[in-house]
Image (tube, rainbow, N blue to C red):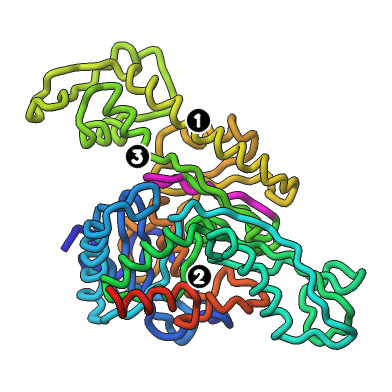
Amino acid sequence: MNALSRPVDGAGSGPQLPPQRARHPKARTGVFGVLDIGSTKIVCIIVRMEPEGGLRALGYGWQRSHGVKGGNIVDLAQAERAVRAAVANAEEMADVKLSGVIANLSCGQPESRQHNIQWTIGGRAVTEPDLRAVIAEGKRRMAEEGREAVHALPLSFTLDATPGVTDPRGMICESLGARLHIVDASSASLRNLGTCLARCDLEVEEPVSAPLAAALSALSEEERELGATVIDMGGGTTSLAVMHEGALLHTAQVPVGGWQVTNDLARGLSTPIDQAERLKTMHGSMFGSIDDEREMLSLSRIGEDGEILARVPRAQMMSIIRPRVEETLELIRDRLADANLGPQSGQQVVLTGGASQLVGMREAATRILARGVRLGRPQGIRGLPDAFHAPGFATTLGLIAWGAGEGRPVLDFDPSTQGSRGVFARLVNWLRDRV
């Protein structure tokens, strides 16, 4: 059992807990589990939805990630062991056996696309089956490209020549137009993820886009409504999500994160990975000073049994960190420009994720993105220790927010979000019978 697996009541001098509020109409009931599979850590939390609408964590487990790179499963056996260990810790603490989880999705090179779909109604009233058929058509187009739709979110509808309709049910028209936002991923990568969880005796009840989850925990309600961009800087990937009027408009991901900075340091300084990570955490910064050339850092060289054999100026380390971080932020800037969302993306950027905590990251992002930037921390949840209030757990707590009903579309006719009836869940069930 790891250091985060000790029972903590969540009270005391830690982060301020969110006020109790009415239960969301789309919230789950009772007990449910979430599983965050990242490139640096795997986290499982079991929570209970209280009758008055609040959330309480019953158990949690954390493991260093193995077999996962860039969000993708690269070693099935190692990934299975890490997932099993994290889930077992949470189950032991909560005294609950999980059969399924809400899981984050960062594998399969996820992409965000908008589709305009026309559906013939023929002069009658629009029905719920019509809306389901529209969403199924959007998913069919993805399947033809070897992609699996993870989210199919209706943004707006057009009835004949009348745009801007939010709920067309019961309205009469000849033709129904729908603007869908679809987040998809490679079908093969999803099958590998499904295989891993099936071997752990788990069903993916709902897959949730990782940047969407980060946005749900790191953005305020006002930011989600007025328009803001969250940038989740993880270990193996950096992703973004744009929200406007409470809806997810766009997501993107680049395969660069905190691990690449650590790897650059290890190569550039000829030091082991764990030494490079320690140097980055303790001395890393985007700021420079006149003392950097004189401040010497001790490190061991590769293959020398950890002995202190070299001293390097801090300036040398920072000359390695800065280019990689700036490249990452420039890639994100380009992804935002390519999305061409204009004012809908807002003027506010919220940085979150473990790699966002590097000293000077906010200032570097402000300069490169030319927007207002703040560091986003997820709100605390009763029963979790203070450590979970850090930016590195934004995606994990965002999965809990999704389970509590946050971020779901007003018209949710996507069968993949309906628990075990979803396409991805059926895939896992199919694998369970054969693996």
- Is 87 in front, or is 218? 87
| In the rendered image, the vertical position of residue 308 relative to residue 77, given as above or below | above
Q: Quadrant of residue 397 in the image?
A: bottom left
Q: Secondary structure at mark 1?
A: helix
- Residue depicted at 55% across the width and 47% down the height: 350
| In the rendered image, the vertical position of residue 399 relative to residue 329, given as above or below | below
How would you rate the neighbour count of disc 3 (Cα within 10 Å): few for under 14, some for 14-19, many for 20 or more?
many
Q: Secondary structure at mark 2?
A: helix
Q: Secondary structure at mark 3?
A: helix
Marks 2/3: CA–CA distance: 27 Å
Outermost residue, front direction?
144
Of discs 2 and 1, which sits in the foreground? 1
Q: Earlier in the sequence, mark 1 or mark 3?
A: 3
Q: Which residue is mark 2?
A: 402
Q: Are marks 2 and 1 in contact (CB under 8 Å)?
A: no
| In the rendered image, the vertical position of residue 9 relative to residue 375, given as above or below | below
Q: Which residue is mark 1?
A: 327
The magenta segment is 227-237
Q: Which residue is mark 3?
A: 259
